[in-house]
Image (tube, rainbow, N blue to C red):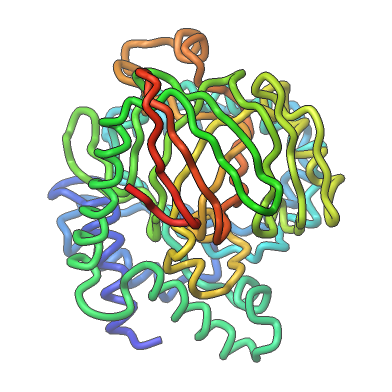
Amino acid sequence: MKKSVLKSYAHLIAACGVNIQKGQDVVIRASLDQPEFIRILVEECYKCGAHDVLIMWEDPTITISHFKHGKLKDLSSMVSWEKERWEHWLKTEPCRIYIESDDPGAMLKMPMEKYDKALKAKLPLIRHYRDQMDGIYQWCIAAVPSVGWAKKVFPELTKANAVKALWEAILKVSRAYEGDPIANWDQHDKALQEKCGILNSLHLKSLEYKSSNGTDFKVGLISGVNWLAGGEYGKLSRIRFQPNIPSEETFTSPMKGEAEGVVYASKPLSYRGQIIDKFWFKFKEGKVVDYGAEVGKDLLTQMLNVDEFASYLGECALIPYDSPINDTGILFYSTLFDENAACHLALGTGFPSLMEGYEEMTLEEVTKRGINHSASHVDFMIGTRDLSVIGTSIDGTKHVIFKDGNWAI
């Protein structure tokens, strides 16, 4: 890929993704296989006025070794230097950039039982800091192709050609392949905000999904919980940033305990490096009470049993079937991309930041209002060419939100 294109993409991430302000620190999480692009990204961060750029290198093989050989007690705890780092970030509020590039099959050798126990134990410790930082700092997730990932997506191509093909796909759906990426994103963001504004103005209390594949499903929504799309503003700084590049979704968190019916997945799900395909869930009183899959049912069992609330919904997202990602016909084996191909739901934790006044609320108060809380969050696609979505407002008025898989509003 031409260096000029990579610089343009890096500039999009730095200037629009996290929208670095002069004097801000930046923390970048990236895999060891991406030194070339990270060098370019660091330079663009400094050009945008960054005070200091810290790279936190990661490698899935090393992470697996930690979980294979480390003691569960140590993996489940937070040592003093980790606490001090989080405290420092709370004070300095750095921009955080997450570069996704791992081979989707990298987790296959992970001792998952031990991993899940450690994650469940450590998440509350991390969440203590994350909840304080939520909505305060700017963050962005973007992607760079690795050889392993590219060969997974394009197994028929040589390594070099697979990486090239994945680069082109990523840049195109990220609106960074042609023209001015930042201008492209500004235009796209305005379109997303328009849809978001309409949905919030309707004061919906429920959504009903129907599709010829068997989906017949109703989910309740929470009064005072907003729809969100595209860019966000820092709660205190009011700096606008784009948390996901790419993004096509307009989403909200539904009411825990109010979901009835059956939903069928419209696309395969890549979960922990393995594929779940042709699967479905039956909901009663908000919880998955039955499920099936032609491929990977045992993985669904793992997914639903991460904790006691992993089988409740945390997100409803609306995305047109004719989205740029879906139009590629590619399964990216990456949630960042695949969840933005068509309408999706997510099992697991919801988003407290969508609730008005959440900054002053405790976790207990947030969950009491209906936002699900779990150590898990897994998105799965339900959008089809003929999907209809009917919304009902609190006054009983019905609105056609989606018709034939696309926006009707």
* Any part of residue 364 in sight: yes
Rendered residue at 32%/72% (across/down): 40
Numbered circles on residues, count: 0
Q: x and y percent of residue 92 in the render?
A: 26, 34
Observer-nearest residue: 272 or 40? 272
Task: Please indicate whether residue 393 sits to the left or right of residue 158 in the image.
Answer: left
Which residue is outermost to the front?
397
Q: Is residue 212 above or below residue 287?
A: below
Image location of residue 26, percent across then percent down: 30, 49
* Residue at the image point whose x is 43% and y is 64% from the top: 323
Q: Is residue 212 left or right of residue 40?
A: right
Residue beneath the point at 27% across and 83% down? 4
Q: Is residue 403 above or below residue 122?
A: below
Residue lying farthest left? 22
Quadrant of the rendering where the N terminus is positioned: bottom left
**140 is higher (above) or lower (below) than 334:** above
Expressed as whole percent of the image width and height from the top left, the position of residue 222 reads: 43, 20
Query: Looking at the image, which is closer to me, 174 or 409?
Result: 409
**Horizontal placement of 171 versus 128: left or right?**
left
The answer to whether residue 28 shows anywhere in this view is: no
- From the viewer's perspective, is 153 left or right of 145? right
Q: Position of residue 205 (x, y in %)?
A: 43, 23
Question: Closest to the observer: 75 or 389?
Answer: 389
Q: Which quarter of the picture shows residue 58?
A: bottom right
Q: Residue at x 33, y 25 (%)?
A: 203
